[in-house]
C-alpha cells in the first residue's frame, strides 16, 4: 500500500526544512591598550569554507551581489577615519551579474581605522556580507555582530556587554547536531522521473514518438538523435534553473504555510485537473509554435535543438500540469531541487525518443495510439484534483479557518477513488473518449487491475470517516483533532497531569489524547514544578513528516506511555499565523525582524537557540534548560525514538538527582 501511495502522491513531497549554512566565520582583533587621541586599526577576518567565496567591499557593479559592509553603532568614544579597506582581494568576472567583482577565497581580511575620543571606549556594530559557491550555485547572505574591547589610557574600560536577548529560553545547544534534511532528495528525483514517464503516456506526447523517429530515420544521424534527447533535457532543466531562485530558503516557509501561495497552488492543481479531464485545453499560441517549427527545418544541430523545442511546446498541454506539479512540490527551500527535479523529469521524457531513434525497429512493438491515451490523461486529472486539497488543508490549518476537516478531505478522496475505478471499468465517458475504443465495452485485464487498486484504496479510506488513523496517509490528511466524529481512535487512556490551563489550547492540539503545552515558558515552568524533563516538539501545520511521526511513532504504546508519564510535552508550531499582543513582540537577533506571531517566535527560538530550522525536531531539556541528549529528527523507527526518550530521562536523573 505504501509503495502505491508514494506514486499516487508524487507531487506533494514538500521539504520540511532547509539546512542553515554559514560558510564564513568571522573574528575581530585590535590592539589591547591605547590612549585617548590615538588612531588604531580594527581588523576583521573571515574564514571561508572550501569551494565558497566572499564578495569584497570595493567593486563597481550596479544591481550586483551584496558587498561586504561594516555598520558601526555611533558612540561618543570614537570616530571613524576613512573607509574600510579590503586586504588583497582577488579579481573575478561574475557571470551571473555580468560584471567584474572582487572576492576572497579561504581567508578574507578588512581593516578600519578609528580615532579614540574618550574612555571608556565602546565599539560595536554589524557586518553584512554574501558568500557563494560555484559548485552548487548557492549564494547566502549573512550578518554578524562585532565588538572590540580596548583598554584606554591605562584605565580599565567596561567590558562590552551583549544586548539583552529576545524573549525565549537560554537553551544550551552544544549537543545539537547539524540541521538534518527532511524529505530525501533522491526520493523527489525518483518521483520526478516517474512523472516524466507518466507524461509520455498522454495523447499529445505518445503519438509524437513515431513521428520524431521517422524524421531521424529519413535524414538524421545517430549523433543528432542523441543530441535531440540532450536538448530536451537541457530545455526542461533551464526551466527549473530559471525558477530556482523563487524556490530558495528565504521563501520556503512563506510558500508552505501562507494562505495566498497555498490557495494559488490549490487553484493551479484544480485547473490542471479539469484540463486533463477534458473541460478545456491549456495550449500555447500557435504562432509561437509555428515559428519554432520553422527554425527546426534548417537542419544541423541548430535544427535539432528547435525540433526539441517544438516537442516541448507542442506537448505543453499535457506536460504543463505535470511540470507545474513538480515545481510546486519543489518549493521547499532548496536552490537545486527544482533544477534537479526538472532534469529527472526530462531524462525520463527524453529517453524513449532517443532510444527509438537509435533503434527504429522497436517501433513495430510500440502500442498504437488510441483511446487508452485519453484514459491515462483522465486518471491523471482525477489525481491532480485529489492532490489539490493538500494545499487547501495547509492554509486551513495555519489560519484556523475550519473549512476542510479531516473527514471532509477523506470523503472527497473516497469519491475520487471510486470515480477513477468506475471510469477504468468504462462505467462512464469523458469528453475526450471517442472512437472505437470508447464504444467497445470490453475491459482489459490491466484496466481491471488498476480499477481494483482504486477500489481497494477507497475501501481503505472508509474507516477513516469514523476516526481510524490511516497511518499511511498521515502526512497528507488534516490532523485527527479536526475530525467531527472520531469514534474508532477515541482513547481511554488517562491523560497526563499538567500544571495549569495551556495557552492556545482552544485552537492548537496534541495527538493521541496527550496533554501538554503550546508555549515554551509555560511548559518549562511546569516541567520544573513536576521535576520532569521537557519534551519540545518543533512542528508545523504544513509539516508532512511531523504528521507521519505522530501517526507511526508517537502512537506506538511504548512511546506514548513514556510521553504521557515521564515528560512534560510542549508542541511549538513554527508556522502558526496567530498574532500575539503587541506587548509580546520582539526583534530577533538573527534577522533583526520583529516577530509578531506564534509561529515566527517559535521558528526564531529554534534557529537562534538551537541553530536548526527543520521540522520535525525533538529536543529534551532539563530544569536549567540544558539540552540533555542529541535532538531527534525524522525517523519512523519507534524503538529508536523510545531509546531517545529513555536516554534523556536517564541524563535528567543524573543531573538532577533530587
Image: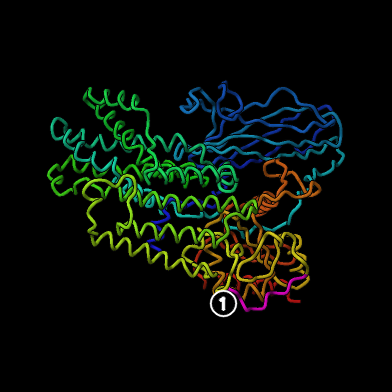
| Residue 350, percent from left and from top | 28, 41
Rendering quarter of residue 121? top right
Residue 200 relative to residue 137: left or right: left
Q: How is the image coloured?
A: rainbow
Residue at (23% x, 51% y) in the render: 439
**For the stretch drawn in magenta, what is the main secondary structure?**
loop
Q: How many marks?
A: 1
Q: What secondary structure is found at the residue carrying circle 1?
A: helix
Rendering quarter of residue 539? bottom right
Which residue was labeled with disc 1? 558
Rendering quarter of residue 426? bottom left
Q: Quadrant of the N terminus?
A: bottom left
Label 1 Cα neighbours within 10 Å, binned few <14 / some 14-19 / many ≥20? some
Residue 242 appears in the figure: yes
Residue 520 relative to residue 18: left or right: right
Of the pair 447 and 189, the residue shown nearer to us:
447
| Residue 562, percent from left and from top | 62, 75
In the rendered structure, does residue 496 fall within the stretch colored magenta? yes
Of the pair 313 and 458, the residue shown nearer to us:
458
In the rendered structure, does residue 265 fall within the stretch colored magenta? no
Residue at (22% x, 58% y) in the render: 442
Of the pair 464 and 8, the residue shown nearer to us:
464
Q: Quadrant of the C terminus?
A: bottom right
Reply above or below: 479 against 69.
below
- Start-end of magenta stretch: 490-499
| Residue 27, percent from left and from top | 65, 41
Amino acid at each position: 500500500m505504501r509503495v502505491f501511495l508514494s506514486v499516487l502522491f508524487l507531487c506533494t513531497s514538500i521539504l520540511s526544512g532547509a539546512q542553515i549554512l554559514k560558510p564564513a566565520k568571522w573574528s575581530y582583533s585590535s590592539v589591547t591598550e591605547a590612549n585617548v587621541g590615538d588612531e588604531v586599526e580594527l581588523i576583521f577576518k573571515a574564514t571561508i569554507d572550501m569551494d565558497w567565496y566572499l564578495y569584497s567591499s570595493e567593486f563597481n557593479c550596479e544591481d550586483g551581489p551584496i558587498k561586504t559592509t561594516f555598520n558601526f553603532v555611533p558612540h561618543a568614544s570614537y570616530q571613524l577615519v576613512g573607509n574600510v579597506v579590503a586586504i588583497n582581494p582577488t579579481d573575478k568576472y561574475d557571470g551571473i551579474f555580468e560584471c567584474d567583482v572582487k572576492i576572497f577565497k579561504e581567508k578574507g581580511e578588512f581593516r578600519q581605522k578609528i580615532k579614540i575620543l574618550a574612555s571608556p571606549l565602546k565599539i560595536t556594530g554589524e557586518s553584512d556580507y554574501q558568500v557563494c559557491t560555484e559548485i552548487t550555485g548557492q549564494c547566502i547572505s549573512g550578518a554578524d555582530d562585532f565588538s572590540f574591547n580596548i583598554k584606554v589610557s591605562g584605565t580599565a574600560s567596561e567590558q562590552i556587554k551583549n544586548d539583552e536577548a529576545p524573549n525565549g529560553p537560554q537553551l544550551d545547544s552544544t549537543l545539537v547536531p547539524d540541521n538534518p534534511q527532511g524529505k530525501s532528495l533522491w526520493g523527489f528525483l525518483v518521483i520526478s522521473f516517474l512523472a516524466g514517464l507518466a507524461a509520455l503516456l498522454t495523447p499529445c506526447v505518445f503519438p509524437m514518438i513515431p513521428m520524431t523517429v521517422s524524421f531521424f530515420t529519413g535524414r538524421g544521424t545517430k549523433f543528432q538523435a542523441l543530441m535531440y534527447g540532450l536538448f530536451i533535457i537541457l530545455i526542461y532543466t533551464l526551466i527549473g534553473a530559471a525558477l530556482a531562485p523563487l524556490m530558495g530558503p528565504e521563501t520556503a516557509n512563506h510558500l508552505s504555510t501562507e494562505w495566498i501561495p497555498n490557495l494559488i497552488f490549490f487553484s493551479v492543481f484544480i485547473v490542471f485537473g479539469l484540463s486533463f479531464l477534458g473541460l478545456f485545453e491549456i495550449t500555447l499560441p500557435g504562432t509561437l509554435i509555428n515559428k519554432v517549427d520553422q527554425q527546426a527545418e534548417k537542419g544541423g544541430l541548430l535544427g535539432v535543438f528547435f525540433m526539441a523545442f517544438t516537442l516541448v511546446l507542442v506537448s505543453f498541454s499535457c506536460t504543463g500540469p505535470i511540470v507545474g506539479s513538480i515545481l510546486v512540490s519543489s518549493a521547499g527551500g532548496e536552490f537545486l531541487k527544482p533544477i534537479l527535479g526538472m532534469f529527472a523529469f526530462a531524462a525520463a521524457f527524453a529517453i524513449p525518443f532517443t532510444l527509438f531513434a537509435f533503434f527504429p525497429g522497436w517501433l513495430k512493438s510500440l502500442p498504437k495510439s488510441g483511446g487508452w491515451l485519453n484514459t491515462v490523461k483522465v486518471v491523471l486529472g482525477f489525481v491532480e484534483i485529489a492532490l489539490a486539497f493538500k494545499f487547501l488543508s495547509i492554509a486551513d490549518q495555519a489560519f484556523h479557518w475550519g473549512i476542510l476537516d479531516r473527514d471532509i478531505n477523506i470523503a472527497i478522496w473516497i469519491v475520487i477513488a471510486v470515480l477513477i475505478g468506475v471510469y477504468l471499468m468504462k462505467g462512464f465517458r469523458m469528453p475526450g473518449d471517442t472512437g472505437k475504443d470508447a464504444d467497445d465495452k470490453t475491459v482489459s485485464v490491466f484496466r481491471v487491475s488498476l480499477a481494483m487498486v482504486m477500489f481497494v484504496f477507497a475501501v481503505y479510506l472508509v474507516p477513516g470517516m469514523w476516526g481510524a488513523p490511516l497511518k499511511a496517509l498521515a502526512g497528507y490528511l488534516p490532523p485527527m483533532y479536526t475530525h467531527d466524529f472520531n469514534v474508532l481512535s477515541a482513547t481511554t487512556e488517562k491523560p497526563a497531569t499538567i500544571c495549569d490551563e495551556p495557552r492556545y489550547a482552544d485552537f492548537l492540539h496534541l495527538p493521541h489524547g496527550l496533554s501538554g503545552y503550546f508555549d515554551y515558558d509555560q511548559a518549562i515552568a511546569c516541567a520544573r514544578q513536576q521535576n520532569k524533563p521537557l519534551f519540545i516538539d518543533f512542528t508545523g501545520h504544513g509539516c508532512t513528516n511531523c504528521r507521519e511521526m505522530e501517526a507511526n511513532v508517537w502512537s506506538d504504546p511504548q512511546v506514548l506511555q513514556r510521553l504521557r508519564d515521564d515528560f512534560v510535552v510542549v508542541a511549538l508550531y513554527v508556522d502558526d499565523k496567530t498574532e500575539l499582543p503587541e506587548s509580546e513582540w520582539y526583534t530577533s537577533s538573527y534577522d533583526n525582524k520583529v516577530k509578531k506571531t506564534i509561529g515566527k517566535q517559535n521558528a526564531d527560538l529554534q534557529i537562534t537557540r538551537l541553530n536548526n530550522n527543520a521540522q520535525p525536531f525533538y529536543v529534551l531539556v532539563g530544569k536549567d534548560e540544558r539540552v540533555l541528549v542529541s535532538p531527534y529528527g525524522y525517523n519512523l523507527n519507534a524503538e529508536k525514538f523510545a531509546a531517545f526518550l529513555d536516554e534523556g530521562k536517564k541524563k535528567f536523573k543524573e543531573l538532577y538527582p533530587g
